[in-house]
Image: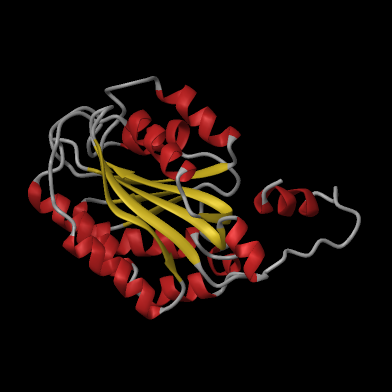
């Protein structure tokens, strides 16, 4: 039984005897390395995102891992470390892994992750397949060398699912796996269905996010993206104790330009 499952059972009162997780070298060699959170960052690069907006997104994710508030959230966990990977997505068969799974526990490891984002290529592709991004995220979790107490998908975008499988079935599969899906919806004000309207916010809230404690950050244009993503990551990697800092924030957290 996986560590994550045992912790859930313990929290539910199923385990009556004290349960101790072994940290011996042999135990570590036999299985994945424990972390507080396995975080997958899924970044929209569909054709509604221009080159400047794509750069804004990548710069925002890199700067988040250089932010003291994010580092405070990472260090505040029981283990004091998370694992993270980043990929970009567009069409149902268009996902590109840009940063592999990395362990982040301090300023040096966070800087390595940020530098890997800085060095990643920038490519804009075609349609918007949130379902394809979720399917790819499931594969990324399956190949992770880490085991988090929680698994969180951080998916950002500026449009609705218009390619690939229906979103509800893939989302249900993620929730059945115990993965929390958080969203970052960008109201980019560009011409197109739902862009810059309340419809995109409603869509992400009702159709995309899900799982215990799931939330949505709405960025009022790409000018707000940097602040939005820093606030979002700090909140989603925070431990139960640290989450009291964010207790007053609503399920839908809006960040103005």
How many marks the image carries: the answer is 0
Quarter holding the C terminus is bottom left
In this view, 235 is above or below 13: below
Residue 49 placement (x, y as % from top left):
15, 42
Residue 36 placement (x, y as % from top left):
57, 62
In this view, 44 is above or below 245: above
Left or right of 5, for residue 100: left
The colour style of the image is secondary structure
Residue drawn at the location 67% of the way across and 48% of the way down: 2
* Residue 190 shows in this picture: yes
* Residue 257 shows in this picture: no
Q: Which quadrant of the figure has residue 135?
A: top left
Residue drawn at the location 29% of the way across and 29% of the way down: 129
Left or right of 121, for residue 32: right
Who is closer to the viewer here, 126 or 162? 126
Residue 108 placement (x, y as % from top left):
36, 79
Who is closer to the viewer here, 185 or 83? 83
Residue drawn at the location 46% of the way across and 24% of the way down: 168
Q: Which quadrant of the figure has residue 199?
A: top left
Residue drawn at the location 33% of the way across and 59% of the way down: 228
Who is closer to the viewer here, 89 or 199? 89
Residue 131 placement (x, y as % from top left):
37, 29
Residue furthest right as drawn: 16
């Amino acid at each position: 039984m996986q560590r994550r499952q045992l912790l859930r059972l313990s929290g539910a009162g199923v385990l009556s005897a004290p349960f101790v997780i072994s940290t011996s070298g042999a135990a570590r060699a036999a299985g994945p390395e424990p972390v507080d959170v396995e975080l997958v960052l899924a970044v929209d690069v569909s054709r509604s995102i221009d080159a400047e907006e794509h750069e804004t997104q990548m710069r925002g994710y890199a700067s988040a891992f250089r932010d003291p508030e994010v580092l405070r959230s990472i260090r505040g966990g029981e283990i004091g470390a998370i694992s993270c990977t980043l990929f970009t997505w567009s069409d149902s068969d268009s996902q590109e892994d840009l940063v592999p799974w990395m362990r982040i526990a301090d300023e040096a490891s966070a800087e390595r992750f940020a530098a890997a984002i800085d060095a990643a290529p920038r490519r804009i592709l075609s349609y918007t397949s949130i379902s394809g991004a979720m399917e790819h995220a499931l594969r990324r979790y399956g190949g992770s060398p880490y085991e988090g107490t929680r698994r969180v998908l951080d998916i950002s975008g500026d449009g609705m699912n218009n390619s690939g499988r229906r979103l509800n079935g893939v989302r249900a599969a993620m929730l059945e796996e115990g993965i929390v899906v958080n969203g970052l919806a960008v109201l980019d004000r560009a011409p197109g269905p739902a862009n810059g309207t309340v419809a995109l916010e409603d869509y992400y809230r009702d159709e995309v996010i899900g799982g215990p404690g799931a939330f949505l950050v709405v960025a009022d244009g790409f000018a707000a993206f940097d602040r939005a993503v820093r606030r979002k990551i700090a909140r989603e990697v925070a431990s139960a104790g640290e989450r009291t800092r964010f207790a007053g924030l609503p399920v839908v957290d809006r960040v103005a330009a």
